[in-house]
Image (cartoon, helix red, strand yellow):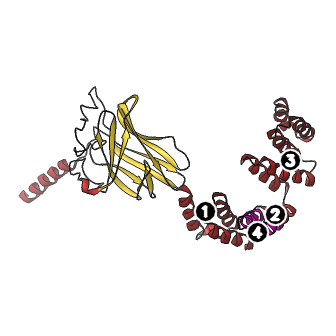
Amino acid sequence: MKTFIILLITAITVAQQNLISPRVSPPARVMQGIGFASVTLSYSSPSVKGRQVWGGLVPYADKDDARPWRAGANENTTITFSHPARVEGREIPAGTYGLHMIIRPEKATVIFSRDNKAWGSYSYTPRHDQLRVEVKMETAPFTENLTYGFKNTGPESTTAYLRWAEKEIPFTISFDSDEITYENYREQLTGTAGFSAASWGRAAEFCLDKNVHLDQGRKWIERALKLRGGATFTHMMIKAGYLEKEGRAAEAGEWREKAMNAATESDLNKYGQKLLRAGKTGESIKILKRSLEKFPQSWKTLSLYAAALKKTGNNGEAARYYKKALELAPISEKPALENLLKSL
């Protein structure tokens, strides 16, 4: 009985020691995707609570080797790059880093440390720095709780920021999105996507449009064309694009003619629209004119051809083709076409 009581007391003591309570500075996490890449920030979020933050709670450094701030609360704030990246234009490998900062009145040194499991900055050592960048401190709307976020996100870059009290510390992050996309497509093609002609064609089109890994892209379009159902208008046009890049203009012309002969109305209209969006108005007009020759009673083709003519400033001809489209269009489409006519 005495042994049982001792064991019970021991168990209660251990349980009391292991009891976890809510943290005053709660944990938070934000993630931003940039193409196939991503950036993730994990941190604890303290509150201002009426205190002076900058130059007070977070003291200003008086020398370059000052002990950095943990850029949050509790354990290391961490930042994870899914792929090799650039921070403020400087390279950093993929991985998870402890994030620390040295703060001055108008600027901050942002430190990416290979130590990412420490408590705060107490055990920080500059020997484990992967990268340091210097950025400007900016004025921002008051924020009670320390917050990380992202802004100005595009296809290749984003700006991460720390915002607290009346200040913001931003730093730009960028990726080689074309290379990451290429590698991702290459990997996908080894899986179930590799059984689809459309997948090989899309990957080949990406390389052609971005002018990257053209040798590999050429192999991919050949694979697309050989697969069942792969000899499509789109794939033949992609092959023509590769031949043209190789200086084989005559062969490129032959493949374009094959594509045109096999094209559906939808094929030609989509291609004409793609050229128009790319600013290739003259080429778009040629394609859409070819579509009109094959499908003269298509209100959709007439409307697209009118839109291309409008881009050249030929409003008179554009109006003529919009009127033809209006005559043939279904009732549900007529109001939109009437508005297009009025806009000329």
Judging by the rendered image, the residue that carries numbered circle 1 is 212
Q: Is residue 238 magenta?
A: yes
Mark 1 or 2, nearer chain start: 1
Say if mark 3 contacts mark 4, CB within 8 Å.
no
Q: Is residue 249 above or below residue 176?
A: below
Toward which corner of the image does residue 4 lie, by quadrant? bottom left
**Distance (Cα) linking label 3 and label 2:** 20 Å
Disc 1 marks which amino acid? Val
What label does residue 248 carry, if any?
A: 4
Front of the two marks 3 and 2: 2
Q: Quadrant of the C terminus?
A: top right
Mark 3 or 1, nearer chain start: 1
Q: Is residue 298 magenta?
A: no
Front of the two marks 4 and 1: 4
From the viewer's side, name the closer residue of 13 and 203. Answer: 203
> In percent of the image, x 46 and y 43: which residue is there?
159
Residue 21, percent across and down?
Answer: 26, 42
Q: Which residues are magenta?
A: 235-255
**Distance (Cα) linking label 1 and label 2:** 22 Å
Q: Is residue 268 above or below residue 159?
A: below
Asked which secondary structure carries label 1, the reply is loop
Mark 3 or 2, nearer chain start: 2
Toward which corner of the image does residue 335 lie, by quadrant? top right
**Distance (Cα) linking label 3 and label 1:** 33 Å
Mark 4 or 2, nearer chain start: 4
> In percent of the image, x 43 and y 41: which residue is there?
149
Judging by the rendered image, the residue that carries numbered circle 3 is 301
Characterize the local packing of mark 2: few (<14), some (14-19) or many (20 or more) Cα atoms within 10 angstroms: many
SS assignment for the magenta stretch, majority: helix
What label does residue 256 carry, if any?
A: 2
> In percent of the image, x 22 and y 41: which residue is there?
63
Disc 3 marks which amino acid? Thr
